[in-house]
Amino acid sequence: MKINEVILQSIAKLVVFIILTLALYLFFSGHNAPGGGFIAGLVLASAIILLFLAFDMETVLKGIPLDFKMIAALGVFLAVSTGVGSILFDVPFLTHTIVAYDLPLLGMIELSTVTLFEAGVALTVVGVVITIILTISEDV
Amino acid sequence: MNNIIVLPLVIPILTGILLVFLHRHVKTQRWISIIATILNIVISFIILQKIHVEGILKLDFGGWAAPYGITFVADSFAVLLVLTANFVTALCLIYAMFSIGEKREKLFFYPFVHLLVAGVNGSFLTGDLFNLFVCFEVMLLASYALITHGGTRIQLRESIKYIVINVLSSSLFVIAIAYLYGSIGTLNLAHLSARIAESGQTPLLTAISLLFLIVFSIKSGLLLYQWLPGSYSAPPTAIAALFGALLTKVGVYALFRTFSLLFYHEPAVTHNLIGIMAAITLIGGSIGAIAYKNIRHIVAYNVVIAIGFILIGLAVSTQSAIEGSIYYLIHDMIIKALLFLLAGTMITLTRTSRFDQVSGLIRNYPVLGWLFFIAMLSLTGIPPFSGFIGKILVGYGAVETGHFLLLALGFISSLFVLYSLLRIFMNSFWGETMISEDQEAPLKKGLIIPCLILALATIALGVGAESIATYVSDAANTLLNPDIYIDAVLNK
């Protein structure tokens, strides 16, 4: 029997954007408030997994032609590199720094190296979660 | 700034990730692997010199002072082991390049080795218990991948046991850490040590320490070694050599650290128990080593015997016994790598792992035969090889404190080691040549050179034991006087 997936697919198209927005919100609210790279990565991955469920895997992977193993590696690389950066500035490993700018229109903007670290964490989580899901589903 | 002490952890991680991107380019992977490992050897040597001059080094990550932040502490004991571990890894990598096959090399073999090394180095250098757990996990996850790497039938069968037992012990590890944190309120090793000394080691703490003893015993193969021989004989030679040389030693390191720095107030309970466990390990390992005809199993049981012997030193805990254990630990990393590589080479050349089906190998491969002979003597503890100094110092410590039973078991087990290897040597290397000259499989230089270097290292360590004596006695001194460690971490 062919399952009719019209409802799931049309809702998924909409909901994915809500989830992605939530992921972005969580990512940027992190490190001082609840949120951060890890949770944002999980939420981001859940959006992609919803796409996998609603559509089939081939279609989604055609749309997002990325090797998720490499994404995970890129994430770890980014996170560790921020630590190594602090060695170059001769401060203890993993020291992070923050600068605040007063930009027109946007107001006070804080730029922190922690964000780079968190980006690395988020990419790693996305890469690992999707790789695990893909590997399990290939097995069946 | 002591940023240098984090490099033995960071370099392998970065190299590992870099090699993930380059996984199609086998040649580039090989070169980068070797260069990174050599860089690590040089760095550990520099750290060792620096400790010699400045005393124990510590680094608070991100400037968050101990005991609140993550701390790395490098004392002579840890760095000696880091140095040896990287040396052994470099040689196992060279061996792997010539034996493991391009298919495995493209399947992320090198990244996993580097992550394994990162975990090992991290475990040696970390200054708090939770990060010890984290580094253990990094090491174990990489080892899960390596033990199943290539996915042959026997590997998958043995890896299930390996993974289940390690997941179990890791969960016990977290539980033990939680208990300790619940009762002491800190996880920084130096801080823990100071607080335990202050409050006294209550029966509750002793009970927790026994939980740690169980955890590390599973990891190091002390008494609870039943999983070890099977798992270590399944993967390809180079990986088995890395496992045999490094993994159990991290467990031994953790035992030494916890029972000399934290739980040293009730030796009547903990240290006596370690002594009993070491004794049973020696007996069990010795029986195992002569029970099998499979070379891989004999070699794996030799790992078990060594663990028992090293822990005699901890059970006795005098300056000379601890020094002996440290010497023996370094010696054992080198010689176990050599033994695994030689056994693996024999199996590759003869295509059988039973020693009674081979004979006369020394005529076909004289270098291999002599190297095996050297490894055998060194393992038994015959001078001038490196096993001698460790055995004699541990024995001296046991005599000093009147642990004659442990002493006797330790030295009788040496005879069993000798017998188990002599059986292989006499059966496989002596006698009529089985392989005619035209059937002889060529012995690649890449396989024999790492073995040659390891054999030279065991001779050098035996003859030149004096040259590292200052570092070893400093390491033993720090282990026996926790105040030095506490002072260096908390009061600088």
Image (cartoon, coloured by chain):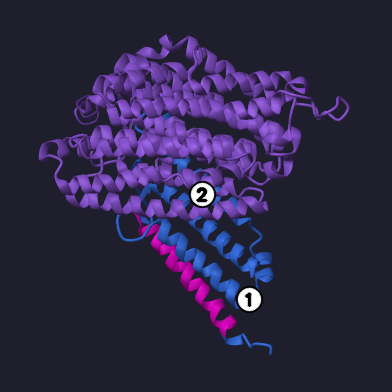
SS at mark 1 in the image? loop
Residue B437's tag is: none
Q: Main secondary structure of the magenta part?
A: helix
Q: Quadrant of residue B256?
A: top left
- Residue B40 visible: no
Left or right, A140 with reference to B89: right
Residue annotated with mark 2: A75
Left or right, B149 with reference to B210: right
Give B177 or B216, whichever is nearer the viewer: B216
- Display colour for chain A: blue
Name the residue: 88% across, 27% down.
B438
- Display colour for chain B: purple
Q: What stretch of residues is rendered in magenta?
A: A8-31
Pointer 1 indicates a residue of which chain? A
Task: Examine the structure image and report whether residue A109 is included in the region drawn in magenta.
Answer: no
Q: Give the amino acid type for the residue marked by disc 2 in the picture.
A: Gly
Structural distance between the alpha carbons of marks 2 and 1: 27 Å
Residue A55's tag is: 1
Task: Examine the structure image and report whether residue A20 is included in the region drawn in magenta.
Answer: yes
Q: Give the amino acid type for the residue marked by disc 1 in the picture.
A: Phe
List the single residue furthest toward the right: B438
Query: Which mark is first along the chain, 1 or 2?
Result: 1
- Residue A55 visible: yes
Left or right, A105 with reference to A129: left
Query: Which image quadrant: the N terminus of chain B?
Result: top left
How many residues crowd around disc 1 within 10 Å: few (fewer than 14), some, or many (20 or more)? some
Pointer 2 indicates a residue of which chain? A
Give B100 or B211, whichever is nearer the viewer: B211
Left or right, B33 with reference to A94: right
| Residue B52, percent from left and from top | 34, 15
| Residue B393, percent from left and from top | 36, 18
Q: Quadrant of residue B443?
A: top right
